[in-house]
Amino acid sequence: MPAFTPPAPLAAHGKAQAVDVLIPVYNGLNETLECINSALEARKRNRTPHRLVVIEDATPVPALAKALKVLAGKGRITLVNNPVNLGFIRSMNRGMALSPGKDVVWLNADTRVHGDWLDRLRQAAYSDASIASATPFTNNGELMSFPRSQVSHDMPSAAEQAELDDLARDTDSPPVDIETGCGFCLYIKREALDEVGYLDELHLARGYGEETDWCLRARSHGWKHVGAPNVFVAHQGGISFGAEKILRVAQNNAVLRKRYPDASARYQAFCLRDPIKPARDALQRARLAQLARYAGKRHGDWPARGGKTLHLNSRQANDARFNLTWQHDTHRTWVCLQAPVAALPLNLDFELPEDFDKLVEALRLLPQDELVFESLHRCPVELCRLPALLGTPYRIACSDPRLPHNDTLYDWQRFASEAASSQLPRQALQSAYAPLPDSHVLTDATPTPAELPADTPRAILIGDNLDATTGHQWLALARQLARQALPTVLLAKAETPWLKSLQATGTVHLLPQIAGFSFADRAKAAGCDAVLSLAENPDAGWPAAALSAELGVPLYANPGAIADELGAAPITQLPFY
């Protein structure tokens, strides 16, 4: 088809103009009808004059095409039928050209809206004359994802979304400047559209990345983009394009990197600053207050099993658990409280020691019947006061190599002796806790080691966290494998500062991130048949042991108390030792 030519702009601009809500449709019968019905239901709640323009892009679902014709015949939607499949970019360009004098809203067919969503979104867009676009909060929408930015969360139900949207409206956080909008639900002013132009049909492949290109182009014209935290639109994601998304993202991102070479650095700097966090926290605190109001009255808010056990540790939180994790950097200590509340997790950060009273207040609003300290290494001493303040029993299920030494700040031996029990993952660590006279020291059952392969392992997973010591050891091993031209390759689980040096040897490969595949799936697909650790004296938090158990493959390691207890094969059995 020939390149799209935008229509001539009309003179009239302003907030009084009507809006076209553009819904591109290709697949997904139930999701599409739910989206359209939610917008129709919300129409009476919005004062903004608008119409729903559904662009049917040659759908392969006859039932969907028929349902759209019925809605159009009743005058509930404006239906545009593409004679052939044009893809998202061409469809949206033609949709935006239908009414040259109107603002537009892109609304994906796998979204759901609620209440006076359009009025609030329009209000954010017109809160400043220099704003080109506004994007609402959502469960799945890049920067505006909630409760965690840049994370795709499960789509809430209609009732759950209605609660979230009502809370967002009542919290009424002000608009926040963001780098780029997100196309799942994007309000665009006609004045900006006339100046910046329409979407690029020539260089971008059918969809994905087109809103980033348009937003960056608008920024070069002096426009800016905002997030609207007082609106929550649910978004499922992946309905229209399915598995084709991976190819489109890769191709279009290459175009964007060449076109806007500094955009990636600006985006990363924005994510580090995270100016949207205050708005996310405000909505989370509103959810916490609502949870306290309905305590004991609603059964679906909290998991039935294990949900009332608060796990305290220093590791990244698991979305399915009730967690309190601590982190340190050079100038501050903070904790993150995460509760598995329906439909989206509750996440709140607290600075220590200044926010400790707020943390206690928040925990008193949440149900808990047990505290489990899963680590004591560098544990903030304030957290050891929680059992007494909350009146909750506690136990220690510790992965630390030894009990922390007593210091002037806290008596760790007394803390351990007053626990209901101290459970250790290895019998080899029991001697470190033996001096505790009043504690009940238990040990986990030793797992059965995996059977050793008959042949030399061909793909071995690096089982150590690469630091200054082990990094040099692994680099030396990788160079040795390269010199001897051995058929064994080493697999790295994640990016590390050592990765480039290791990959330069040609014997180390990074496991790729593949959508829909777990770590175990990716390791299996890469042919991983063993885990190797070069650590001299591993402790209870030894990552190689956990990786071996997760993958069900044998572990090779230096002899030692913990390695022997786990049945690890001596590293000397490898031919390249």
Image (cartoon, helix red, strand yellow):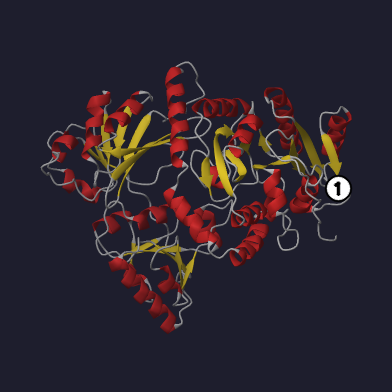
> Tag 1: Cα neighbours inside 10 Å, few (<14), some, or many (≥20)?
some
Asked whether, in this view, residue 317 is left or right of residue 153, the answer is left
Q: Nearer the viewer, residue 444 or 415?
A: 415
Please say if 479 is above or below 384.
below
Where residue 223 appears, x then y in whole percent? 60, 50
Query: Which element carries disc 1, helix, strand or loop?
Result: loop
Q: Nearer the viewer, residue 346 or 271?
A: 271
Q: Quadrant of residue 363?
A: top left
Please say if 485 is above or below 366.
below
Question: Which residue is at 55% across, 27% downward?
Answer: 169
Task: Tell me, yes or no, if residue 151 can be seen here.
Answer: no
Please say if 298 is above or below 524.
above
How many numbered badges does the structure rendering display? Answer: 1
Single out the residue that lies furthest toward the left. 408
Q: Which residue is mark 1?
A: 82
Please say if 168 is above or below 477.
above
Question: Which residue is at 66% across, 54% downward?
Answer: 214
Where residue 62 appears, x then y in whole percent? 86, 40
Single out the residue that lies furthest toward the front. 11
Where residue 396 appears, x then y in whole percent? 26, 37
Question: Which residue is at 39% across, 28% downward?
Answer: 308
Asked whether, in this view, residue 162 is left or right of residue 446, the answer is right
